[in-house]
Image (cartoon, rainbow, N blue to C red):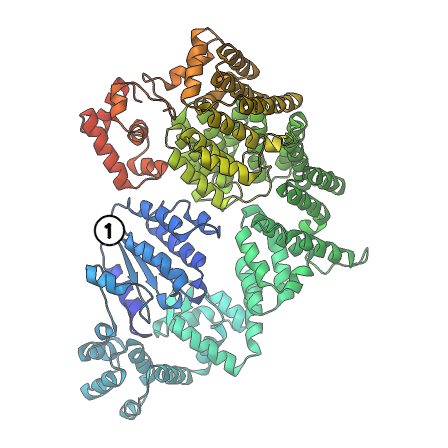
Amino acid sequence: MSAPAGFGKTTLLSAWLGGMEEDHRRIAWVSLDAADRDPASFWAYVVSALQTAVPGAGPSALELIASSDVSTESVLTMVLNDLAMAPTDVWLVLDDYHLVDGHGVANGMVFLLDHLPSHVHVMISTRADPELPLSRWRARGELVELRAAELRFTSEEATAYLNDVSGLDLSAVDVEALEQRTEGWAAALQLAALSLQGRQDVAGFIAGFAGNDRYIVDYLIEEVLEHQPEPVRSFLLLTSVLDRFSGPLCDAVTGRGDGTEMLTSLERANLFIVPLDDRREWYRYHHLFADVLRARLLNEQPGLVPLLHQRASAWYEHKDLMEEAVRHALEAQDFNRAAQLVELAVPIIRRNRQETILFGWLKALPADAVRNSPVLSVFYGFMLMVSGDLHGVEPRFEDAERALAAVPSGAAQPWAVTEELRTLPATIAVYRASLAQARGDAAGTSEHARHALALAGPGDHLARGAAAGFLGLAAWANGELSSALETFTQAVASLHASGNLIDALSSTVVLADMWLVAGRPGTARRLYQDALQLAEAQGESVARATAELHVGLGDIDREAGDLAAATRHLTSAGEFFERAPMTESRYRWFVARALIARAEGSPDQATDLLDQAEQIYRPGFFPEVQPIEAMRARIWIVQGKTSEAAEWAQTRGVSVSDEVSYLSEFDHLTLVRLLLAQNREHPDRGAFGQADRLLGRLLASAETSGRAGSMVEIRMLQALSQAFQGHRAQARGMLSMAFAEAPEPAGYAGLFIAEGAPMMELLRDAADHGIAEDHPQRLLDLTAPPKAQVPVPGYRLTSSAEEKLSGRELQVLRLLDSELSGPEIAQALFISPNTLRTHTKHIFTKLAVTTRQAAVRQGRDRGLT
């Protein structure tokens, strides 16, 4: 719908959609303004609106939008896949699109419109034709256009509006004159009707009515305002600074007591007021009307505008609506007050994890206002660190320390007196420890964490817990596992004592990771289960932590060989992540999903998921002990893409001559796999020797610090190396030692199975010789055709039925044998519902069945599920 302002586009859309039967419509309405020209803002509003119309649409899209490195097409692909599952027609309305039109938004719009499912429709209301390929869609018959010619009031419609709706009782001649002068422009007719109310010389007014669109609007708005009683006119101007308003808020801003009655009167008079709720408590002005009112107010009483915003800010503060209070203080350019309001809001923001709002406020404040507030300087630095800007962090901390030092001891402080201000020195030390952690400086992390402990009081549990946590992370990064476990356990206890449950639960994830490194997956599982029970009792308030715990349990299940349980946990995690704000740990879900895809024999899907994880990963609070790039290289090695893996090693700067440490262990073990793969076809005894010597040094490091989990993996690779060199007896001996090093061998199925066919051969040889008790046979049973729980990369299964089904079809069949619905299966596999239907059809054909239940029965009978 393309037409100038005031042609009734929004009204027509609203009335038409409102006339649909409710059972056959899902409407997502986005009212746009100029602030939405930024693509991230625009798509955030669009996805949010779609989620209200189609619950579950774009479960991860809002979090991805917050990452500047994620492409719009990646976000929209996720949303489109979910929209395809909507059970009925979906209407996305983009009202006032001209305010955001431009290349930044247009590129994503073209992609969206070119890939829309047939039952999803987009309606664009705009004052000018958008920068979109309209001619192409017009030629395809995919475009319906309504323009000013179709929207203009006819003489009959103008008569009905002016006389029946507005009650003017104009003659046919007068109606015709107005219709001709306005050319059927709805807004002009509406404003004319308002101006005509109570006039004696109707014919004279109509005769003098002339001008183009802009002048008509200006003239009629002036006429409307000038013909209102002074109390009404004053009320309109004074309340125009508000984006939305209620009676009590209007009273606070105007200093009068008639707000509720006035709003009722304005609505009855159709004076460009729009109700925002069914109770008629909150309203807004028509945007065009509000713009003119604000311009008039600014012209007549410019000095009054800041005072009105200050009054609005004070009212919102009294109601504990801090977001609006801060916004009006910023509009008033009362930056000192705004800064103090933000200081007061920090505890709530931190508790609710609304860092994006906080960052927006800090960027809106002048640099001096932030610099002069120690609390704001510190949290600005923290936000920079979260966003990945490590270089800008330290200067903010130094600003805070200078501001604190400038106030004489015992003097009144010019900032809001909060707990955050009292504990700020310890907080600065904690964040410096975090900054050192993000830079891989374990020594610096320990130094700053100890300083934080010295500054924190006995009852400052949050600061003490965070400091102890970073001491534990530093010890972990150094491979000092025993110290790390002891210190980090204390950290989790302190966080619980502080009442900061979200951080306590999230830290449990890290503690469980440490126990995995110690070779104790059973202990890690119990930690997760206990924490998850506590989190589920808290409900939505800890959704993010609940999601992280599900991811951790999914990892343990995958490693134990139970992919169905792992998938269920990740599905649950995804649902919780939808309702939680973006966090630094969100990337772990994509990594966990990638490892499941790899275990299921879908390496390409696994690398795609790792790419998504890499896009949202930010170095920060935890040691990077398993770099995403090295995970990707391991998949390439199993695929035989050794040149890509070799390029990774060169770019990463990993070599056999490096000093070994826990932080570089994952890279070095990946390099060992690369060396073994490169020399398998063309044996080079010297190269094998290099790999063996590196493994020996890694083993010594792991033994020294008690990293039993690392020792299992190192012994396993030593066994493979000996097998590739033809030393079968030595290979069996090393394999036996690998199982012996594991305190809980059953928890390491995924580690062995991921090595593919060579490991299967070695396991069979070990089983034939009675090596390592029943562990080799247990792993063989997990991958054998009768059970077929985990398809092995590079390992050909022998069941005739399994040969007929592709790897993807096997994945679908196994998920059909679960409680997941069709849309949930498609979401779990990152495919569209149409693709899922195609796979299901192929499965039915190959198994000679016609229903899901029959396919599941056949799969079980043939040992496929």
Q: Front-most of 335 and 223?
A: 335
Left or right placement of residue 433 versus residue 595 in this view = right
Q: Amino acid at mark 1?
A: His
Residue 25 or 92: which is nearer the viewer?
92
**Residue 483, position in %: x, y?**
68, 27
Tell which of 267 and 574 is nearer to you.
574
Farthest residue to the right: give it: 409
Relative to 212, residue 148 above or below: above
Residue 618 to residue 705: above or below? below
Q: Quadrant of residue 204?
A: bottom left
Residue, x 50% and y 27% (percent of image)? Answer: 673
- Residue at image point 64% right, 24% down: 701
Q: Position of residue 5 (x, y in %)?
A: 33, 74
Give 654 or 492, whichever is nearer the viewer: 654
Res 13 seen here: yes
Callout 1: SS: loop
Circle 1 packing at 10 Å, graded few (<14), some (14-19), many (20+), is some
Rendered location of residue 218, percent (x, y): 39, 83
Q: Quadrant of the C terminus?
A: top left
Q: Quadrant of residue 399?
A: bottom right
Q: How many marks?
A: 1
The percent coordinates of residue 382 (x first, y second) are 62, 50
Q: Residue at x 54, y 47 (%)?
A: 352
Q: Is residue 737 above or below residue 440?
A: above
Name the side, left or right, on which 427 lies relative to 783. right
The image quadrant where one finds the N terminus is bottom left
Identify the residue position indicated by label 1 in the image.
119
In the displayed structure image, the side of residue 774 where residue 326 appears, left or right: right
Q: Can residue 320 be seen from the camera position used here? A: no
